[in-house]
Amino acid sequence: MRRITLPRMGYSYIGFRAVFDALGHEFVEPPPITKRTIDLGVKYAPEFACFPFKITLGSLIEALSTGKVDTIITAGGIGPCRYGFYGVMYEKILKEELGFDFDFILLDPPIKPYGNMKKVWDIVLKWKGELSWREFILRLTKGFKLAWRKLKKVEDLEALILKKRAWVKDISKVEDLFNEAIRKINLSMDLDEVDAIYKEAKDSIEAIPDDRGDVLKVGIVGEIYTILEPFSNLNTERLLNERGVEIERSVWTTEFIEYNVFPGLPFPLKQMVGWKGKDDIVKYSKPFLNEFVGGHGRESVAHTVMFKERGFDGVVHILPFSCMPEVVARGILERVGRELDFPILSLSFDEFTGEAGLITRIEAFIDLLRMRRRMAA
Amino acid sequence: MRVYLGIDIGSVSTKLVAMSDSYEVLSAVYLRTAGRPIAALLEGLRMVEKDIGNAEVCGVGTTGSARFLASVVSGADLVKNEITAHAVAAIHELPDVKTVFEIGGQDSKIIIIREGVVVDFAMNTICAAGTGSFLDHQAQRLGIEIERFGEYALKSKNPVRIAGRCTVFAESDMIHKQQMGYSIEDIIAGLCEALVRNYLANVAKGKDLKPPYVFQGGVAANLGIRKAFEKEIGFPVYVPKYFHVMGALGMAILVKRYVEEEGIKTSFRGFRIVEDRFTSKSFECSHCPNGCEVVVIYRGSEPLACWGDRCGRWQDKFGRGSVVGELKEVA
């Protein structure tokens, strides 16, 4: 049995927990991201590393410091941007610089022309542990199924509160119901139970009467980590919600997994999981951006255009300071905004970002959107 | 007479405007915040009261980085970000304005307006190069009053080229040019041009600049910067009469509209508050490793508001009145 943890990113740990619990390993939940996490990451990461790297490094240091962890699992062995360095960097800093002793499992996209089958095999053996092959396959299947369902349901609830919070004055009621449901889903080991918890939470959140009007609709695009981990963006989504703006995210953990795993699957399997490819991204990012620029740069552009077509009031673009793909996207989004007459606010975050400037920008952006609505009416 | 009060408390300066029902500015106060926003606000109110006598204040609006603090202390009806406030004032001054340059003490903004509506804006993000406090600092270093900075710049025939990318480089480059023997006038004019270039390259990057241009904020007083803008963009730049208090003027206009539209009675605490003792205390919350520094504002011993907690633990409960007791103990 291993005691496993991984860097925290939003609620993704819920999925990993389901898999490792099913395999009989002990999953150590990464502690919530706090200022201390960021301080630790900033202290030990290279100064010019990405902000998400600093946060996740801090998160791993906190988890290792508890002494309850012997294995770290993380993605980021190859990557479309500096993310590709995360794995090696974690290992180097945590082992060589800080002297932690642990087993490091790096998850690469499994099957690619340059993929290393030997590595995949080693990981399988580590996860299998003492289990018989039959038992391992059964548990793994069950674990993945449960993890996927949990992640999907948690994301559905997140999507729900990102809308609902904009419509009610006392958002703590919505958040209490949400947090309780997340806690229960995380602990549940049964597919039907997960569905039931989801249904109950969804119904009771939807039943809260709306007591605000004139709600704006804004789409979120940008870098996945900074979007999914609220602490890293100073809770921008909540700041928007509180000011009467409902939000739709364009990036999610499950989608990230699909994008990274499904394209590598052999053809029949691709059909089975219903992978449709990235045709829409390619289509909608034209003619503004016709190349892959790393990370989610192209997605940011395409989703912005899609939000415009769907009649949203505007888009908020969230990126970590110095994130190469998103910096490219930001430049292009300025043109998208001008040509499509569509308001876009780019917000970049790092350990120095101050809340005062952020709130000023957000409020000015909301004023701008409301004014446009009034003029259009 | 009905009067509307706009308050703009920035990092460097505190601005107050009292405006009549017919949009006439009755009082415009500009003073240094000097790190004590509450004291500056009370001092400002005292000065406004002198100007307007016993006219009836029908609405108060606050903006600037201390807008929440100012709102709590004064009992404001409307709190707005400084971008909207500045845009409203600029549109009021010049209804067909298309571009607003605003340079204040710590930040600089650009606001793009089309047909009287804000369509785009930006604020400086990282570097304070080109903002008022930097100019202040350089004036001090050169032993020139900041008020006469522009005068010197206009005397220059041959502005030197100064690296304006960042304050540190600009300063060392300036010293270098001084030591090389360039005249003070040429250096100051060069600095003005460098700051304008820096502003246009960073804050205004990618923005659709179109005339007419309005230039406001404390730095607009500086003739050298004004001239550098005109040289760089090739159009005249209009500086409104109340350029130094535009944020406060914008708030006075906004709160007038707001009070009239909603038909509300102002919650202004009255000028007598200048006699009260307002204090702020802060403590480190120990409920999680964030260790947020929570600030509580008191009037006498009564807590008025609190903020600074990331999770909202203190703010939310304060809203429901359940932590007031706890906060009293902290005091």
Image: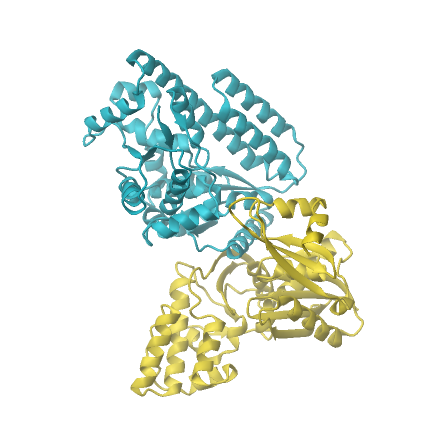
Horizontal and vertical percent for residue B99? 49, 64
Front-most of residues B45 and A337: B45
- Identified at 52% across, 59% down, the residue is B113
Front-most of residues A61 and A262: A61
Query: What kind of colouring is applied to the model shown?
Result: by chain
The cyan-coloured chain is labelled A
Horizontal and vertical percent for residue A245? 57, 43
Horizontal and vertical percent for residue A194? 51, 20
Quadrant where the image shows the N terminus of chain A: top left
Rendered image quadrant of residue B288: top right
- Identified at 58% across, 62% down, the residue is B64
The answer to whether any part of residue B256 appears in the image is no
Q: Is residue B55 above or below residue B321?
A: below
For residue B160, side relative to residue A148 (left or right): left
Front-most of residues A5 and A107: A5
Rendered image quadrant of residue B296: bottom right
Q: In this view, does A29 lie above or below B77?
A: above
Shown colour of chain B: yellow
- Identified at 62% across, 70% down, the residue is B15
For residue B72, side relative to residue A186 (left or right): right
Front-most of residues B312 and A291: B312
